[in-house]
Image: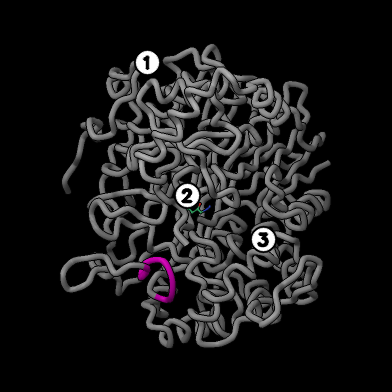
Amino acid sequence: MRFFKPPPSPAIATVVLSLLMLLAPYLNLQFIYLQHHWRLAPKGVYGDTAMVVSAHGLASDIGRDVLAAGGNAFDAAVAVNFALAVVYQQAGNIGGGGFMVYRLADGQTGALDFREKAPLAADKNMYLDAEGEVIKGLSLAGHLAVGVPGSVAGMVALHEKFGTLPWDVLVRPSIYLADEGFELSEKAARMFNRYQADFARLNRHQPIVVRDQKWRAGERLAFPDLAQTLSRIAKFGHDGFYAGETARLLVDEMRAGGGLITQADLNAYQAVWRQPVRFDYRGHKIISMPPPSSGGLALAQLLQGASAYDVAALGHNSAAHIHLMTELQRRTYADRATHLGDTDFVDVDMAGLMAADYIAARNADIVPDRKTDSKTIRPGLVNVIESVETTHFSIIDPMGNAVAITTTLNGNYGAKVVVKGAGFFLNNEMDDFSIKPGYANQFGLVGDDKNAIAPAKRMLSSMTPTIVEKDGRLKLVVGTPGGATIITSVFQTISNIIDFNMSAQQAVHARKSHSQWQPDFVMLEKGTLNIGNMIGLMRRGHQPYSWPHFTYALGRVEAILVHPDGRLEGAADYSRGFDDRASGF
Ligand code: DON
């Protein structure tokens, strides 16, 4: 399923919207205001010293228990990550990859890149036919869509550097969950049911989730093969995945299904420690993910761009506010498409893209009453040196260490391929490359040479695990899934807290808008497109569009806010009936 669908024909949309504009004076706007106000009312979960926020209550509780047992945020991260790989298989994973941004209690910060890599046998044109046209679906489903997984290497690397509890103790809860089984939530059952046909079509064997009757909420489901794989990881660490039995099963799966990953790819895979992107926003220090994620640089352009305006004075989600967000976003995404890629392979002028005068010049033609056409926006001129499922969790431990991890298989259940005998899903991250210049990926994102496929290269990401500090003290740990909308969701969550003084839960649940240069329209989360801002946006020349994919929505933010009195507010996005939960003490 494509995550990102274009709106209905502009002609129909224009007629419908014009009719609504005519009717506006006769409609009851009070209802919309109350609905909006109600959304902002909820409060998060409060804790005095420790908090874990993730996409599944079982995983959050396991993380909390690790912290209660004296483990630190990194120990908890390992336990949460593996637990999500069992209870939240559409995105939690050992067959995918991700990023971590951390801040130690003493203020040191860093980033870990465990993003997937293109296999050594990958080729720039591997998804094109003889005429140079994209073969639809090849980068999205099945064995050829799979990048070399990085998650286990990432967990091992962060544990080696910062872990305090024994590795196998941290993997054990997930082995237990996979072995004994756990109750499916309504969402989990529905998701397994939705993809039955794909699972059956894309696997040569029958994965445990494929069966004739529908899965029902409350049923207990165990994953014995996955439990065995996790046991090998518990026992052998890195080699429990990249060597021995698990590696053999993975390479066999690739060979049988026509995939490219070999033992040489697995031998070569290493997670990489990187310097995070750091910048200021209205007296706060923002620490975020550098390339191969676009998240940190894009966030720097957006927030530094926003700092030139009195955002709060515009009124949250007013037409003027959404207009400004949109104008900032379309310029940022134009740069993303052109200038960003894996810095181990291509040069990215990070300092240039984040420079205050560059951002000011880029935004100089923003006017309050008229949109800029995407056609007239070109990527900015910086120093070009030639040479839809994810999951986020946030953790703060009693010592004051903070961890933000976003990890993914890319689409729901990734390539929908389960490794026979090993019981885990493989990613379809290869679609995040620019598989042909200008060709939109499943999130509608375009790209060029910098993000072209090359052997062992990492595909550009939007994942934006982020930490905010104020006056040298930790203030916020935040991140989200959402494909292209990750960056805009993190941007607006931070702005909601800093500019609009919202609580963490209010900021997480507040409805968001999104635009990404191409396609040239503004998406608003359900409940945001009221008559007032619709008229305001259309008057400015925008084409507003209510986001229809409620399962994904614009982000599913998991945040922890440190309040001025030191209390922690954990805010999970449960607004659409998700299983996300904050758990702390
Ligand atoms: O790395 C990226 O940007 C994408 N693979 C993330 C995919 C995603 O967030 C899908 N989730 N809703």
43 versus 269 height, above or below: above
Give the x, y percent position of residue 399: 74, 39
Residue in the image at 75% along x and 74% along y: 221
Give the alpha-carbon distance from disc 1 to disc 3, as whole Å: 45 Å
- The residue under the point 70% across, 66% down is 189
Q: Nearer the viewer, residue 525 or 185?
A: 525
The amino acid type found where label 1 is placed reads Asp
Does 375 appear above or below 182?
above
Magenta residues, as a range? 137-143
* Residue 142 forms part of the magenta stretch: yes
Task: Judge whether 49 appears above or below 140 on screen.
Answer: above
Q: CA distance from mark 2 to mark 1?
A: 29 Å
Decide which of tag 2 and tag 3 comes sooner along the chain: 3
Tag of residue 369: 1
Label 2 CB, ligand 1: below 8 Å? Answer: yes
Local packing at callout 2 (Cα closer than 10 Å; few below 14, some 14-19, many 20+) is: many
Residue underneath mark 3:
84
Task: Estimate how packed mark 1 is, as few (under 14), some (14 to 19) or many (20 or more) residues with alpha carbons within 10 Å.
Answer: some
Q: Position of residue 268 (x, y in %)?
A: 40, 70
- Which numbered disc, 1 or 3, marks the residue closer to the eye? 1
Indicate the amino acid at tag 3. Answer: Leu
Q: Secondary structure at mark 2?
A: loop
Q: Looking at the image, tell me whether mark 2 or mark 1 is earlier in sequence order.
A: 1
Q: Quadrant of the C terminus?
A: top right
Closest to the camera, between mark 2 and mark 1, is 1
Is residue 474 in view from this perspective? no
Q: Name the residue located 37 percent from the left edge and 58 percent from the top edge.
A: 458
| Residue that mark 2 sits on | 483
- For image coordinates 41% across by 86% down, the residue present is 255
> Is any atom of residue 91 visible in this view?
yes
